[in-house]
Image (cartoon, rainbow, N blue to C red):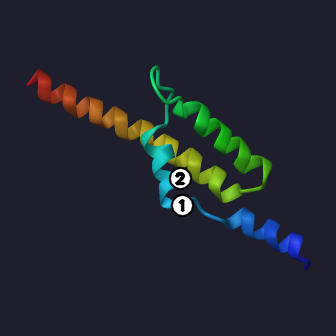
Amino acid sequence: MNLEEENKEKRKHTPLTVEEWLTFFFFPFESKKGLDTNTFNKVEEQRFQDYGFDEKAKQSSEARIYGYAFYALLFAIIFLIVIW
């Protein structure tokens, strides 16, 4: 196995860093003002696929799903507190 093949294998199994995961988790959707984090997330996910970061691509999708669930749950809790 040569160096290029070893690097491809490493890229396939490299996980997201904590900072990357938190970015996908806390900013899973498009913001109307300020930073367009959705474009950033899409560019990063495309880069992961283009360069063979399979594990990062999978984890970024999962983090975004968890982010949507987090905000939905947070909204529901706040809504219930306000209603009661």
Percent x, y for residue 80? 17, 28
Could you classify mark 2 by the number of other residues whose Cα lies within 10 Å: few (under 14), some (14-19), or many (20 or more)?
A: some
Residue 44 placement (x, y as % from top left): 65, 44
Looking at the rendering, in which quadrant would you find the N terminus?
bottom right
Q: Please give the name of the residue rendered at 50% of the width and 47% of the height, measured from the top-left corner.
A: 63
- The answer to whether mark 2 and mark 1 are in CB contact below 8 A is yes
Vertical arrangement, residue 53 with respect to residue 46, above or below: below
Number of disc labels: 2
Residue depicted at 71% across the width and 56% down the height: 54
Label 1 belongs to which residue? 17
Q: Amino acid at mark 1?
A: Thr
| Residue 33 sits above or below residue 78 on the image | above
Q: Determine whether, in the image, residue 2 is placed left or right of residue 70.
A: right
Residue 38 picture quarter: top right
Q: Which mark is residue 20?
A: 2
Quadrant in which the C terminus is drawn: top left
Q: Is residue 3 left or right of residue 61?
A: right
Point out the residue furthest to the left here.
84
Nearer-the-camera pick, 38 or 80: 38
- Regarding mark 1 in the picture, which secondary structure is present there? loop
| Residue drawn at (48%, 55%) of the image | 19
Q: Inspect the image, locate mark 2, and give the three-letter code of the amino acid beneath it.
A: Glu
Against 84, residue 27 (above or below) is: below
The label number, if any, that marks residue 59 in the structure image: none
Task: Characterize the local packing of mark 1: few (<14), some (14-19) or many (20 or more) Cα atoms within 10 angstroms.
Answer: few
Query: Label 2 to label 1, Cα distance in Å?
Result: 5 Å
Q: Position of residue 81 (x, y in %)?
A: 13, 29
Residue extending farthest front? 34
Where on the picture, by quarter, is residue 15?
bottom right
Residue at x-position 22% and y-position 34%: 77
The answer to which of 5 and 82 lies nearer the viewer is: 5
* Spot occupied by residue 39 in the image (x, y as percentages of width and height): 60, 31
